[in-house]
Amino acid sequence: MSADPARQRRGRPAKSGAPPLDREQVIRAAVDMTSREQAQPLTFRSLGKRLGVDPAALYRYVSSKDELLLAVADGIIAEAAEGFVAAGAWREDLTELLCRLHRGYLDHPEVAVAAAARITRLPGEMRFAELALGLLIDAGLPDVEASASYRALADTVLAWTAFRAGLELNAAAEADHEAWEVACRQADPAAFPHLSRMAGSLTGVTLDEGFRATLDLLITAVELRASNPG
Amino acid sequence: MSADPARQRRGRPAKSGAPPLDREQVIRAAVDMTSREQAQPLTFRSLGKRLGVDPAALYRYVSSKDELLLAVADGIIAEAAEGFVAAGAWREDLTELLCRLHRGYLDHPEVAVAAAARITRLPGEMRFAELALGLLIDAGLPDVEASASYRALADTVLAWTAFRAGLELNAAAEADHEAWEVACRQADPAAFPHLSRMAGSLTGVTLDEGFRATLDLLITAVELRASNPG
DNA sequence: ACCTGAACACCGTTCAAGT
DNA sequence: ACCTGAACACCGTTCAAGT
């Protein structure tokens, strides 16, 4: 009766009596599960439990954990690109687009750690790159410099994203920061004059401020390059 | 007979009949083992095998894998700081110091991935920070701006380090790059005009070039800040 | 005092078996 | 056609037992 033969109930039904899964449901469940709010581990066992099937059943829809990971990552990138609205000023627009990617991944920290250094080559990532390149071309950069600048900006943002996400997932790492301030304050001023004197301002910089400052410094340098070609 | 009581042979000897271990031997073995050349996994089982003892025996010298990791990381940072020789030009010196850290960690990729975002608060890291802060103060930056610049530079370098190390450890990730060029070249020029046109220059940027360019852009922006305070 | 070996709760993945 | 369940080779860590 169903118009889609893939939807027909054939073979062994799931325990729950639910219709068979499809790939998109699997990916969506994985995206959902890895959100900061739910914070479920991205494992076949956990995903299987959520979908009410044996973990091994998921191999019908994804060929490996790696393929699952890239598909989930691309969903996150796609959302960052889709929600972006250009205001017309390339500098602010580029900052906003890159920050959307950063925030999107940070809401799925385990995916960020595992996939931020990967290239998915899937539709979300392609649209994202096209948007960002367009902004750099608008800024007046020639193709080769726009390419180099895109790579410097995007790779730096992705590296920072995995960096922050890794910290967020690790309680020991989160605790490092407070202990660091104490260590700097207690450092011997004779051996560590700068470190001990600057302890407060040094350890007072939050990662969010550090990320924003880095992105701002980089875009400033790109702007300089755009206005002084050659 | 030994002058050091900790060296006396008491209790059950190791299988090998060797004298008991000490903490420094354990750390040194772990540093050695994780080099790119040896590429042994940093696990208690692997480290135990190398030292000829049961993995559980190592808990006498380190309280956890986390403590082991931080000690190994600090050894790598210490080596980067110790081999540094200042030439007197802050910009080149700072670049060299940060690149030494980057290269040192990249020679121990598994440690880089796990520890680059951590703060060890151990001697190597303290010396490294003191050196880098000194160079920024020499550049003429006031304390607060030197702190912010140090964090932006050091955290960016560490993030990039983990980013590259992660790629190096993952064969699938290494393969992404070549497949990416193909995907960009084959992209529909109507939907992805920039991406398809710039495929060559975009995917032609190596990670090493990207890292160098990023560091150069950042230091340029810091220099700008130093010469135009406020 | 120092090391051993089994145990526990995890992981991705494979494969034969059920319906 | 689709799902199940056991199995395999890994992890960090604990703990009672050996010498």
Image (cartoon, coloured by chain):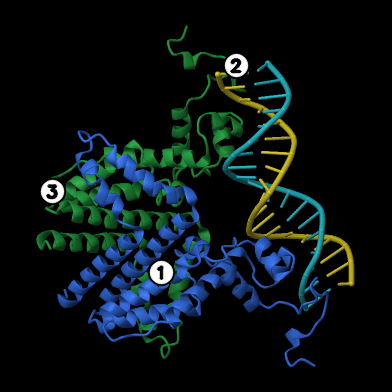
Chain colours: A blue, B green, C yellow, D cyan
Vertical order, A70 against B56 (above or below): below
Q: Which of the labelled discs sits on residue A102, or is there none?
A: 1
Q: Is residue B101 visible?
A: yes
Q: Is residue B185 visible?
A: no
Chain label for disc 1: A
- For label 1, the crowd category at 10 Å Cα-Cα, with few meaning under 14, some 14 to 19 and many 20 or more, is many
Residue at the farthest top position = B1
User: Residue drawn 30% across and 56% down?
Assistant: A205
- Report whether mark 3 lies on the same chain as mark 2: yes
- Report whether mark 1 lies on the same chain as mark 2: no
| Residue B10 location, quadrant | top right
Q: Is residue A145 left or right of residue B58?
A: left
User: Residue drawn 36% across and 77% down?
Assistant: A97
Q: Nearer the viewer, residue A133 or A15?
A: A15
- For label 2, the crowd category at 10 Å Cα-Cα, with few meaning under 14, some 14 to 19 and many 20 or more, is few
Q: Nearer the viewer, residue A180 or D8?
A: A180
Q: Which of the labelled discs sits on residue B11, or is there none?
A: 2
The three-letter amino acid code for the residue at tag 2 is Gly
User: Residue drawn 42% across and 10% down?
Assistant: B3
